[in-house]
Image: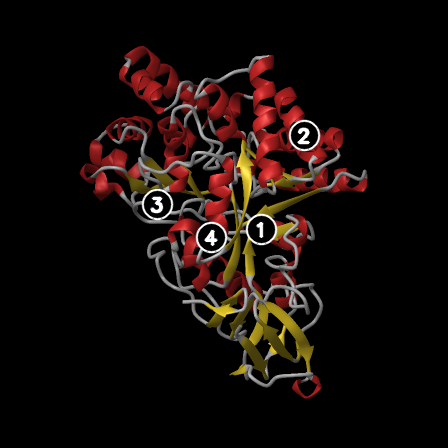
Amino acid sequence: MSNFHFTGGVIIDGSGVPPIQADILTQGDRIAQIGSGLDFEATSGATQIDCTGLTLAPGFIDSHTHSDLQVIEGRTEKLRQGVTTEVVGNCGFSAYPPARDPAELRSFANGIFCGDDTWSWPSTEAYLRAIEASRTANVASLVGHGSLRIAIAGSRQGPLTESELCSMESLLAEALSAGAVGFSTGLMYAPGSSAPTDELQRLCNLTAKLGGIYTSHIRSYFSELVDAVEEQLNLARHSGGRLQISHLQAVGANNWHLQTRAIEAIEQARAEGVDVEFDCYPYVAGSSVLTQVLPQSALDGGLPALMARLHNPAQRRVIREETLRTVPWRWSDIHISSVGTERNLSVIGKTIEEIAATRRCDPVDAMLDLLLEEEGDANMLCFNQSTENLRASLSHPCATIISDGFYVKGRPHPRLYGTFPLLLGTISRQRGWLTLPEAVHKITGKPAARYGLKQRGLLKPGHYADIVAFRADAIDSPATYESPKLNPIGIEFVYRNGHPTP
């Protein structure tokens, strides 16, 4: 058993209180004592770590990620920015339960998971055992609504039969009983986008009954933002459970004024006793699959059905017209971040507007053609929100701060490499939007409490020894949208469960 004595550092314990000068003694995977080194009962045999000039904080918790496969593969991008715990299974996408046709689940999730055509697990329990063995993170998982639907009804959209709903409830109960910490929806992604509210209510009621958290990528962040938030608040009112609204924001300049109304609705619901909070990431741009730009009805039956529709001139015309009617972004705001084939590698980093100019066609046609050429395998980075709204959401007392990061076979969003150092550096130290203890709390103690991650998120005797040491005057991320794969600066070391990490 390895013991460590961290001396001379400043401690921010994750609770939000001001920092203190103190030492930390760890024994095995736990924190044994915090205080003056002279007061420690036994430090003999402990390896001394000089932390002079460093700030010590709990390992950061990324409570909204899509690293469902990468936490098993041993990727270290998150560890390098101080993340020791990840919550996967967000936005309705989880790697389980197994589908009758594993290829259909992979087709649904691979755009978010950056997966291949080989992954699958024979059971929910098998996947949860796999993430327990992760070498790079403590992992908690949500079970995704979209994956539940795929398991029961494939990629078919629309209301389910009573028998199918009962089967989905059984799979949800099985996952929560096996160790999933909650249930997530992705109501802008087919097939979950077609689910009626009463289907969601049944699943939320069960989640609340079994003590899980419910997180939602809501139906719209565009002109229907407030209505979409209200739908989720009503689900929580009736279930009595915990609700976490995912990556809250108003997308598109014409909709930016709606964020204040959405937050006011959340505050009103909290005043009524609804247990609701939200999360957000510290960037004005987001990222997703390129098919997110389309009306999700076009994906009824999955990607093969979409390809057939795009090959049909009459059906393509319908999709084209509805896309033009509903798209909230300017074509210059949508950048291609990955494609599935080599033929289109040259478009990575380019906007839809730029691609259209090269191809001498309308932007919507350039996008539809690209989706056809890549058989739907393309991702985008899109500029969504205003700086003013970003500050309002990050600094709100209900906000937990996340990366929402996912891997792509191309140019990822810089949040995959830099979310938490950027928060502590550019956002907190330079801009002053949050104090350092407030910022640390929003990525440690707050998400640990929200997701029921026991004995994590605080530097406290008896808790797991997840410890990040950084230079408060230097920590930051140099990763940019153009050059996202740059490691953070100012982080000196990271310990997870009492052990130094690579």
Q: Quadrant of residue 177?
A: top right
As helix, strand or loop, the secondary structure at mark 1 comes to: helix
Q: Which quadrant, please, contains the C terminus?
A: bottom left
Which label lies toward us, 1 or 2? 2
Kindly identify the residue that appears in the image at 44 percent across and 58 percent down.
135
Query: Marks 1/2: CA distance?
Result: 38 Å
For mark 1, does the 10 Å Cα neighbourhood hold few (<14), some (14 to 19), or many (20 or more) residues? few
- In the rendered structure, are the residues bearing label 3 and label 4 in contact, judged by CB atoms less than 8 Å apart? no
- Residue 166 % position (x, y): 61, 19
Q: Which of the marked residues, 1 or 3, is nearer the chain's N terminus?
A: 1
Query: Marks 3/4: CA distance?
Result: 24 Å
Query: Marks 2/3: CA distance?
Result: 34 Å
Q: Which amino acid does label 4 sit on?
A: Ala
Q: Which amino acid does label 1 sit on?
A: Glu
Q: What residue type is labelled 2?
A: Leu
Q: Which of the marked residues, 1 or 4, is nearer the chain's N terminus?
A: 4
Badge 1 is on which residue? 388
Which label lies toward us, 3 or 4? 4
Kindly identify the residue that appears in the image at 18 percent across and 37 percent down.
343
Which label lies toward us, 1 or 3? 3
Q: In which quarter of the image is residue 30?
A: bottom right
The answer to whether residue 205 of the structure is visible from this angle is yes
| Residue sitting nearer the eye, 412 or 176 | 176
Q: Quadrant of residue 296?
A: top left
Badge 3 is on which residue? 408
As helix, strand or loop, the secondary structure at mark 2 comes to: helix
Q: Which of the marked residues, 3 or 4, is nearer the chain's N terminus?
A: 4
Give the residue at the far bottom of this rendering.
Answer: 38
For mark 3, does the 10 Å Cα neighbourhood hold few (<14), some (14 to 19), or many (20 or more) residues? many
Badge number at residue 133:
4
